[in-house]
Image (cartoon, grey):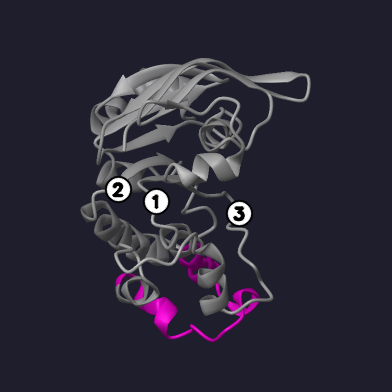
């Protein structure tokens, strides 16, 4: 699935958060969106899924204009968001959380519950546990699995490593590589630059709602001017 964002502007109340953002993702490509806290990463993903009411410009999902569509209509096009903060159902078990994410029952679904337990084996061991009992890493994996079980073609990941220990991040990176190999298009909003280098083929740098640079992640992160001006490194 392809994504094309053109002249995207967005507001939180009266405050403008995005100023003419332009981005594109090719079929099967993983692209990172990097920047400081408050730079506009989450807002861009919220616009892509249709979760922000006040937005203008163009967000094309495989050629379909989604500006003006509600989140559930964007999801039907094959877009799924793993939000910042996980937002799992803490009173439901792992299996119940996953069932809640199923959009339709079909024999040819790419991401069955059993396949998810194979890709994310730590979930298999806690499948009957309530979401609120899980560790932060387990909750993050559950949030990703719940998005995948809807069989998306475009996966939006908003700060998936936030609050996770380095060892958990390392495990999660390996599992996301497995998700990549399934051919999904992935837009990754992330501050963990090691994960960005490992997963993304391209990256955009965003600051104060404006795209400041675009290119190979390793080259961008080696640029001292970019690191100092936009990444606080």
Tell me if I can see residue 24 in this picture.
yes
For marks 3 and 2 on the same chain, the one whose residue lies earlier in the sequence: 3
Quarter-wise, where is residue 13 in the image?
Answer: top right
Which residue occupies 61% across, 54% down? 85
Callouts 1 and 3 close, C-beta under 8 Å: no
Label placed on residue 152: 1
Tell me if I can see residue 10 in this picture.
no
Question: Secondary structure under badge 1?
Answer: loop
Residue 113, percent from left and from top: 39, 74
Residue 104, percent from left and from top: 46, 62
Residue 188, percent from left and from top: 41, 41
For marks 1 and 3 on the same chain, the one whose residue lies earlier in the sequence: 3
Marks 2 and 1, how far apart at CA:
8 Å
- The residue pinned by badge 2 equals 184
Between 148 and 62, the residue placed more toward the observer is: 62
Callouts 2 and 1 close, C-beta under 8 Å: yes
Question: Secondary structure under badge 2?
Answer: loop
Between 211 and 229, the residue placed more toward the observer is: 211
Segment tinted magenta in the rendering: 119-142
Q: In the image, is residue 106 above or below residue 3?
A: below
Callouts 3 and 2 close, C-beta under 8 Å: no
């Amino acid at each position: 699935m392809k994504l094309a964002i053109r002249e995207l502007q967005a507001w939180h109340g009266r405050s403008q958060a995005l100023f003419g953002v332009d981005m594109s993702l090719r079929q099967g490509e993983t692209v990172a969106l990097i920047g400081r806290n408050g730079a506009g990463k989450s807002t861009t993903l919220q616009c892509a899924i249709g979760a922000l009411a006040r937005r203008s410009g163009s967000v094309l999902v495989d050629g379909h204009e989604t500006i003006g569509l509600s989140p559930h209509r964007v999801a039907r096009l094959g877009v799924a968001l793993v939000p910042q903060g996980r937002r799992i159902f803490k009173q439901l078990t792992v299996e119940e959380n996953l069932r809640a994410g199923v959009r339709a029952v079909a024999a040819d679904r790419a991401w069955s519950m059993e396949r998810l337990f194979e890709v994310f084996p730590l979930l298999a061991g806690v499948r009957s546990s309530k979401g609120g009992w899980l560790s932060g890493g387990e909750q993050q994996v559950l949030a990703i699995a719940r998005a995948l079980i809807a069989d998306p073609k475009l996966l939006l990941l908003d700060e998936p490593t936030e609050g996770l220990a380095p060892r958990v991040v390392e495990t999660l990176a390996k599992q996301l590589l497995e998700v990549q190999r399934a051919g999904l298009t992935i837009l990754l909003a992330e501050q963990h630059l090691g994960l960005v280098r490992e997963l993304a083929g391209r990256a955009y740098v965003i600051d104060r709602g404006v795209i400041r640079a675009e290119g190979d992640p390793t080259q961008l992160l080696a640029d001292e001017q970019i690191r100092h001006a936009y990444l606080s490194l």
